[in-house]
Amino acid sequence: MKNVLRYALALAFAFAMPLASLAPPALAAQGSLHPSSDIARNKAAARRVYTEGLNQGIFEVAYTPDFVGHGGAATFTHAQGMAEARGWRTAFPDLKVDVDLIVAENDLVSVRWTARGTNTGSGNGIAATGRAVQVTGTTIFRFEDGAIAEEWTSGDSLGMLKQLGLFPAPPATASTNAR
């Protein structure tokens, strides 16, 4: 029985090696297109967007000249994105954004984040309310040569407006009062 098992394993290895070399060149090279060092570099840059940029106001992460951001139905440029980030820091001077989860594959980095702050300033069209908020969201970054080329962001804007008291409940009607 031992000899049969050894023979089966030898055949498996003998056939596996040549088959691996028959992989299409694009598939065979896929692992080398984005080595782990590139993925680690991209994850570190994505984390800095939050730890340095939004938390400290130090916006030094590299972006490509043709960067495109996607937020909801709108797209935005790098300059518009930076203006909005500075607006959030003005509206929430104690803004703290935690990176809850970060996952990367090839040229994409996904970040699950939680933002907390007290709205004591005015920014991004929001007047100071003095209220504290906690908002969660997800951003996916696409990198080119270590620079952010594209971004998709989704955060709980409705939850933030409710916490700020800027999205009141609809007025009671006769049918809701009767329940």
Image (cartoon, rainbow, N blue to C red):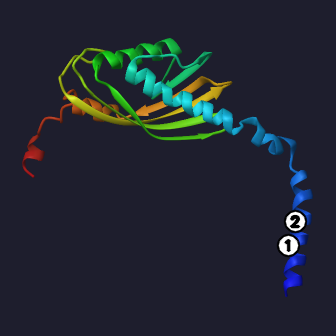
Residue 149's quadrant in the figure?
top right
Residue at label 2? 13
Residue at label 1? 9
Dot 1 alpha-carbon crowd within 10 angstroms: few under 14, some 14 to 19, many 20 or more: few
Residue 30's quadrant in the figure?
top right
* Residue pictured at 89% horizontal, 58% vertical: 17
Query: Of residues 138 and 14, which is closer to you in this image?
Result: 14
Mark 2 element type? helix
Residue 106, percent from left and from top: 67, 38
* Residue pictured at 21% horizontal, 18% vertical: 128
Give, as a three-letter code, the residue at label 2. Answer: Phe
Asked if disc 2 and disc 1 are in contact, CB closer than 8 Å, the reply is: yes
Query: Of residues 85 and 179, which is closer to you in this image?
Result: 85
Residue 150's quadrant in the figure?
top right
* Residue pictured at 61% horizontal, 31% vertical: 41
**Looking at the image, is 152 positioned above or below residue 102?**
above
Dot 2 alpha-carbon crowd within 10 angstroms: few under 14, some 14 to 19, many 20 or more: few
